[in-house]
């Protein structure tokens, strides 16, 4: 019995060890898979835009420079303990594009200056109050902090201020709070405010140097690329449309499948990116031929038209998919159907050509000369179609293209 | 001559004074106008959402509470000079919705803890290096700061991390930089790290108390309202469509004018708001009947469908405007045209009814029972129309409504 029991428990033990081993193995394999997936994601993010790697290294460099300021003793003595604020400034101000860094840096420096002055004023007021009673100073300071913070926070809800100075207002509240509150215990307040301002200036300066002089990423260029890229995507959609639905060897059933260009969806969702890039681009110095008065708002108008065009395409695409799914009865009038198909194909071809031309014109910033001719062909085709068929969705896209073309001719 | 000259200069002086007066007057008037415009904007922002005023007061209150912590001497002695970090935390962490505040507060507290531990490790490493040479410590610290900051910055480009932990990674870099760099000069590093963590915890705690217990603004509720509001706007659009184009007293020329419902545009641009609200809503505690497992991603799916529907409407609207502008020739077949108009009117009526029902069902979170019947009527009308007219844009919207209805029935 005992031996049997021993054997049994031995067997159990072996089994437990084996299952533990299996568990460990599967755990390790799972971890390995996760790590591999993560590495793939990291690689993907790097391949998608190699400037990201450069940006990461730039942040590291800026921080290393700031720490050198802290480590070198003479510099440290000049700035005092608040030299550590420079580190904070670099981390918070460094952004991906030059425009964003400039906007944040200038906002931060200016807001710190203004808030510092007001906070020193609040301190003087609180000192006056101290003469009235022992608890006068903290009470006055608390009340002032409450009102200034409430008013400034409310300002952030006003759209104009939110768009350009949101960060500045936050820093204003921050600096006012810091200086006013610490004024209760710190003796040399003016010196503290001075030091804080200088360290922030040093931080902003280092940030600007690294972003502007080392592989700069201009928000303006990105807006430009986004605009022409969007036009290209729309053209690609119409080309896919032409190839799949109206071409010689049309395979309508494939449309809407995995292979079909779903590019227009990303155009539809590009508004947020475009708006923020335009805001940052306005902070950037001269750019291209327009120097300081680059028509950034024109890009936003163009973007709105692109999205309008994309939403027509979205409607068109879902219509085509629905039609191909429901297996329409054979056309009652094969002659007319053939004619319509031919005109549609022609229209798509010309529209996509116009869009490609516009994209190219936007990219090179030249006047799109042959656009009007091609456009006229497309519109003519559309009109001949309209006379035959009163209601046709494809017409819409041509209309939008016409509007886009007119605006772009104004722009360039 | 002299008298004449004197008179002349007197006249000149009077003229100068008068023009100065005029200039001053116009300047004052301009300033007054600007101030009035600004006051109107402030009033508008407050009226649009009265919770904004409450939020501003809450920020003021939280800051006042934190300064009380600083002013009361026993508390101050416990936390040391770094009590001022609590002020900073409150300003940076306080956000409009509970979810956003929670997400930022937890991110900040956790990131500070992790970064503090790693930075202390880096300090130990640097102290080892000091034994090798005089300049060993700063060099090792600078190199470490460079690599950690670069790696962490790059992590922020990975979409999954950007969506949920972007702020946490920023704070990680910040704390690591601050602790590692200041470790060179501060003697009692561990104590500093401790104090920094406690003050941040105090700041986060005060923020959470004020946001959760005083007029909380739940991101989850906002998502919910946005979803049902979007459905309502779509319904309103179709109603306007029905009234203006297909109704008894249709006035097609008015459509697209100032009075027409342009609501669907705001639906098209709601993606960014919706995504950020959903991200924050995921951080919030239990909400409604679903407790902790509220299907937030379903709201995003619903939003996508709404936007798809809205883009169909956009296409439809621009088509109607184009048609009404180009003055189509009188229909060749008045009987068919009348029939089509009637069916379109019927379709719009039913579709808008379905959308209203869905909006109500989303709002009250009940199963939309009569939807399927109304939907069937609309689809039947659409099918009878399709048999008569092969290509019709209005069909699209019904299709989208059908998809929306199906999804919503799953959701509720």
Image (cartoon, coloured by chain):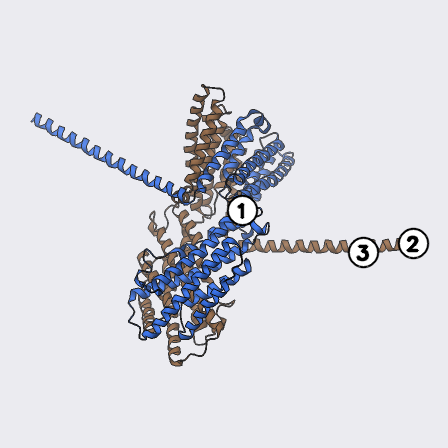
Chain colours: A blue, B brown
User: Tag 1, which secondary structure?
Assistant: helix
Residue A320 vs B16, above or below: the answer is: below
The image quadrant where one finds the C terminus of chain B is bottom left
In x, y percent, where is residue A302?
50, 58
Numbered disc total: 3
Horizontal side of residue A32 vs B83, given as left or right: left
The image quadrant where one finds the N terminus of chain B is bottom right
The answer to whether mark 3 and mark 2 are in CB contact below 8 A is: no
Label of residue B15 in the image: 3
In x, y percent, where is residue A20?
21, 33
Query: What residue did someone put label 1 on?
Result: A166
Query: What residue did someone put label 2 on?
Result: B3
Label of residue B389 in the image: none
Compare residues A391 and B291 and report the one nearer the observer.
A391
Letter of the chain that mark 2 sits on in the rendering: B
Compare residues B362 and A203 and report the one nearer the observer.
A203
Q: Residue at position x 54%, y 29% from top?
A: A69
Residue A129 vs A320, above or below: the answer is: above
User: Tag 3, which secondary structure?
Assistant: helix
In x, y percent, where is residue B102?
42, 43
Q: Residues within 10 Å of mark 1 (few under 14, many from 20)?
A: many
């Amino acid at each position: 019995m005992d031996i049997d029991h021993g054997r049994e428990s031995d067997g159990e033990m072996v089994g437990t060890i084996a299952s533990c081993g299996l568990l460990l193995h599967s755990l390790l394999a799972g971890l390995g898979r996760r790590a591999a997936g993560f590495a793939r994601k990291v690689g993907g993010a790097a391949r998608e835009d190699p400037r990201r790697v450069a940006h990461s290294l730039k942040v590291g460099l800026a921080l290393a420079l700031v720490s050198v300021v802290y480590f070198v003793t003479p510099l440290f003595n000049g700035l005092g303990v608040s030299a550590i604020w420079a580190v904070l400034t670099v981390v918070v101000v460094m952004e991906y594009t030059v425009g964003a860094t400039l906007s944040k840096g200038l906002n931060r420096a200016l807001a710190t200056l203004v808030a510092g002055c007001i906070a020193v004023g609040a301190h003087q007021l609180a000192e006056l109050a101290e003469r009235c009673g022992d608890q006068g100073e903290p009470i006055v300071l608390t009340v002032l902090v409450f009102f200034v913070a409430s008013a400034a926070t409310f300002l952030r809800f006003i759209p104009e201020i939110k768009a350009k100075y949101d960060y500045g207002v936050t820093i204003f509240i921050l600096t006012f709070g810091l200086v006013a509150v610490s004024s209760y215990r710190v003796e040399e307040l003016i010196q503290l405010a001075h030091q804080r301002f200088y360290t922030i200036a040093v931080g902003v300066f280092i940030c600007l140097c690294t972003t502007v002089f080392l592989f700069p990423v201009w928000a303006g260029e990105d807006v430009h690329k986004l605009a022409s890229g969007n036009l290209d995507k729309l053209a690609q959609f119409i080309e896919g449309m032409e190839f799949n639905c109206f071409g010689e060897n049309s395979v309508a059933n494939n449309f809407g499948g995995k292979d079909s260009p779903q590019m227009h969806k990303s155009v539809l969702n590009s508004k947020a990116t475009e708006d923020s890039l335009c805001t940052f681009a306005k902070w950037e110095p001269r750019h291209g031929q327009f120097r300081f008065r680059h028509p950034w708002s024109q890009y936003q108008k163009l973007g709105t038209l692109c999205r309008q065009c994309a939403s027509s395409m979205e409607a068109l695409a879902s219509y085509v998919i629905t039609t191909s799914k429901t297996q329409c009865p054979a056309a009652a009038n094969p002659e007319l159907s053939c004619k319509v198909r031919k005109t549609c194909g022609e229209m798509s071809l010309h529209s996509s050509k116009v869009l490609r031309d516009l994209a190219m014109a936007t990219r090179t910033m030249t006047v799109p000369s042959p656009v009007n001719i091609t456009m006229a062909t497309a519109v003519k085709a559309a009109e001949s179609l309209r006379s035959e068929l009163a209601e046709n969705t494809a017409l819409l896209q041509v209309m939008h293209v016409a509007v886009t073309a007119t605006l772009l001719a104004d722009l360039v």
